[in-house]
Image (cartoon, helix red, strand yellow):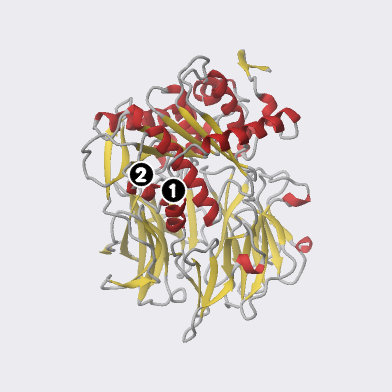
């Protein structure tokens, strides 16, 4: 099949692989399954047992407090799922919700949860088999029972409870996916009353004629002010709406747009109502690395007062009110976490929090009601080699009291994490993280290079069991912090979007070249690994520099850039990539679309494509078409494989699924890069 787009002739010989009901597609998939199994049986390296141990370690998130009760999520040692626990003062902790027990064994997982202000109920979102949509059910804390009826079709929905503890706002499309509405790109705001059916819910924001989508909601500590954040896609400029629930009914909120005087239209902003009733705005308005401002919510078009200014080197990622006139700011320096305490009236720094090492702050929680002084703050922490756990700090001395439920795992042998920079094609300095046994390269080693470079997402040092197992076996693990990500703020992101998306690819290839030049590896020992937008990144590197890599792992990738808008959630990504409906942007897309740059007779690296049957975000058709094209075109004789996983989707998976996927990925790389574990 051939398309003609604004004068461009665009062949698409594998269009038929987009149709999963097409008999040829089913036959082709069965042949790929057989081929993959045949090759996998020949791999001699087995990472399964060690990865099950690494993935199966205890991991815990920061807790939330409601009415003095603590709620938290932990994955028990060896557990398949995260389990929700609760504890009241003077009482031992107890399991509140174990999806494997309450919903039956399998792949049902707790996606998110939100306790009511009185601590009696919890709104829980549960998904199965990797589905993008979840069922929102209400759990009774006293009995541990889930309501029989649920709200279907939710997708990563925020939940904001009203003070009565019997009603909450949430987000979902107009028609649930299981009722024939598909995954949907609409995100409307609804009001639900506990005990009533979802059919009685009232739509309070959004509609068929409103292109905006609700991405976040929140209610102030006193339950009076409702704040909604809207955008027309991920990583797009945000619009804030505010409703005073003391002056209107919750089912008929009277919205006012928050637009501070002089603020830029392209700015992204995240808002929160503080315990003092002021509106706190985390914004990149005239501050690409973000700043924190405050304003009076009674004057939505008034002026912002800067509280914490933009840092010249670090990106401000979040803040938490501590009480006692203090707040905690969370930063990322080259995606490495940092935290500082500030006076809430002047923004003056009063202390810097000492973290265990180069890692990531995964959350902050204060065990005190809003507006009250807390004696301690709980901070979630993770690093490349350390599973997520919680540290407790005394406010004032800022010394850690003790880890909360210290993780149990066999520590890996000595490894070092280094952050460095290297020049890209245009001279821009690109950051990279290296995890290895040595601080400097003693000799070239098989190296796994990964990256993301999209949607303003930062790739930093969070726990990576695959990386630990790889380095234990003698390899090197590297992360390229390329443009399009958020490691250096909004400008860094924008420089890797649309017409600048080629910058992301150039940055990734430049990091690969630097690793070779600095003696860490060789092209014959270098593997590129990426998923989702990172799958696009390594797919582009595959076709643009096949000489630079020995193997490529392309997981859940976006690869056909002229048809991505027609698949999955692609319609929401036009600001990131460009649109084939625009004659100028078609030229960008044709310039970097991996699928359209596969050339017959090229000696391509070995490639492992990974797809997931329940993936409704990135259609597996991208990988099917690219796999068929590379299999036909490659002259190298190296394997081009497709691993298709059933019972999972684009996002989270069970511990066993994650370990099995990682084991196949690492075994493939071992075989191709020559790593002998």
Instruction: Give coordinates of residue 609: x percent, y percent.
Output: 54, 35
Q: Please state if 303 lies on the left or on the right of 171 as rendered.
A: left
Say above or below: 377 vs 507.
below
Q: CA distance from mark 2 to mark 1?
A: 9 Å
Q: Residue 547, image x and y in percent?
A: 39, 22
Q: Of residues 133 and 22, which is closer to you in this image?
A: 22
Q: Residue at x 47, y 46 (%)?
A: 663
- Choose between 110 and 493: the one closer to the eye: 110
- Mark with earlier residue (2, 1): 1
Image side of residue 167 versus residue 504, left or right: right
The answer to which quarter of the image holds residue 8 is top right
Q: Which residue is under mark 1?
A: 47
Provide residue 622's location: percent of width, then percent of height. 60, 32
Q: Is residue 660 left or right of residue 359?
A: right
Rendering quarter of residue 209: top right
The quarter of the image holding the C terminus is top left
User: Which element is circle 2 on?
Assistant: loop
Instruction: Please name whichever residue, 17 or 292, is drawn nearer the observer in this view of the structure.
Output: 17
Task: Check residue 302 in the rendering and tell me which mark sits there, or answer none.
Answer: none
Q: Is residue 592 above or below residue 616?
A: above
Q: Quadrant of the N terminus?
A: top right
Circles 2 and 1: CB atoms closer than 8 Å: yes
Please give the count of numbered marks on the rendered protein.
2
**Image coordinates for residue 277, horizontal then vertical, percent:** 48, 68
């Amino acid at each position: 099949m051939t398309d003609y787009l604004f004068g461009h002739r665009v062949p698409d010989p594998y269009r038929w692989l987009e149709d999963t009901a097409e008999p040829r597609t089913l036959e082709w998939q069965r042949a790929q399954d057989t081929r993959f199994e045949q090759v996998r049986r020949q791999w001699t390296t087995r990472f399964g047992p060690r990865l099950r141990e690494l993935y199966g370690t205890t991991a815990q998130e920061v807790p939330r407090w409601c009415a003095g009760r603590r709620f938290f999520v932990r994955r028990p040692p060896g557990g398949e799922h995260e389990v929700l626990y609760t504890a009241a003062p003077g009482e031992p902790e107890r399991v509140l919700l174990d999806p494997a027990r309450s919903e039956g064994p399998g792949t049902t997982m707790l996606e998110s949860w939100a306790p009511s202000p009185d601590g009696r109920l919890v709104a829980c979102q549960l998904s199965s088999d990797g589905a993008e949509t979840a069922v929102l059910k209400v759990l009774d804390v006293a009995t541990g029972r889930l309501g029989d009826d649920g709200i279907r079709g939710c997708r990563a929905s925020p939940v904001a409870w009203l003070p009565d503890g019997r009603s909450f706002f949430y987000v979902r499309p107009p028609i649930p996916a299981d009722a024939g509405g598909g995954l949907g790109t609409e995100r409307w705001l609804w009001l639900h009353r506990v005990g009533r059916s979802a059919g009685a819910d009232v739509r309070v924001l959004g509609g068929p004629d409103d292109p905006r989508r609700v991405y976040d909601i929140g209610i102030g500590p006193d339950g009076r002010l409702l704040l909604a954040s809207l955008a027309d896609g991920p990583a797009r400029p945000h619009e804030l709406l505010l409703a005073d629930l003391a002056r209107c009914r919750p089912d008929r909120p009277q919205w006012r747009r928050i637009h501070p005087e002089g603020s830029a239209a392209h700015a992204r902003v995240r808002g929160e109502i503080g315990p003092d009733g002021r509106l706190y705005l985390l914004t990149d308005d005239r501050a690409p690395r973000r700043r924190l401002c405050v304003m009076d919510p009674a004057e939505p078009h008034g002026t912002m007062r800067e509280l914490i200014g933009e840092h010249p080197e670090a990106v401000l990622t979040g803040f938490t009110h501590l009480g006692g006139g203090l707040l905690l700011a969370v930063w990322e320096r080259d995606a490495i976490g940092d935290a500082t305490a500030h006076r809430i009236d002047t923004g003056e720094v009063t202390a810097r929090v000492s973290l265990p090492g180069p890692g990531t702050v995964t959350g902050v929680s204060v065990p005190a009601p809003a507006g009250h002084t807390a004696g301690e703050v709980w901070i979630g922490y993770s690093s490349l080699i350390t599973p997520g756990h919680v540290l407790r700090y005394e406010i004032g001395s800022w010394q850690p009291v003790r880890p909360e439920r210290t993780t149990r795992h066999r520590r890996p042998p000595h490894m070092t994490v280094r952050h460095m920079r290297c020049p890209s094609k245009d001279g821009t300095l690109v950051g990279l993280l290296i995890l290895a046994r040595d601080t400097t390269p003693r000799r070239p080693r098989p190296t796994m290079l990964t990256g993301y470079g999209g949607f303003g997402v930062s790739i930093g040092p969070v726990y990576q069991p695959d990386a630990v197992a790889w380095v234990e076996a003698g390899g090197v693990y590297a992360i390229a912090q390329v443009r399009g990500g958020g490691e250096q703020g909004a400008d860094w992101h924008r420089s890797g979007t649309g017409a600048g998306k080629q910058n992301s690819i150039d940055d990734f290839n430049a990091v690969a070249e630097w690793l070779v030049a600095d003696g860490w590896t060789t092209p014959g020992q270098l593997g590129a690994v990426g998923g989702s937008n990172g799958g696009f990144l390594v797919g582009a590197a595959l076709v643009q520099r096949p000489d630079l890599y020995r193997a490529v792992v392309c997981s859940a990738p976006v690869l056909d850039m002229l048809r991505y808008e027609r698949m999955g959630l692609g319609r929401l990504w036009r600001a990131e990539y460009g649109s084939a409906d625009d004659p100028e942007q078609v030229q960008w897309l044709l310039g970097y679309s991996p699928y359209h740059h596969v050339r017959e007779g090229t000696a391509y690296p070995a490639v492992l494509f990974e797809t997931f049957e329940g993936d409704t975000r990135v259609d597996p058709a991208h990988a099917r078409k690219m796999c068929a094209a590379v299999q036909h075109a490659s002259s190298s004789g190296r394997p081009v494989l497709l691993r298709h996983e059933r019972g999972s989707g684009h996002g989270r998976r069970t511990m066993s699924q994650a370990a099995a996927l990682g084991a196949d990925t690492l075994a493939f790389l071992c075989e191709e890069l020559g790593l002998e574990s």
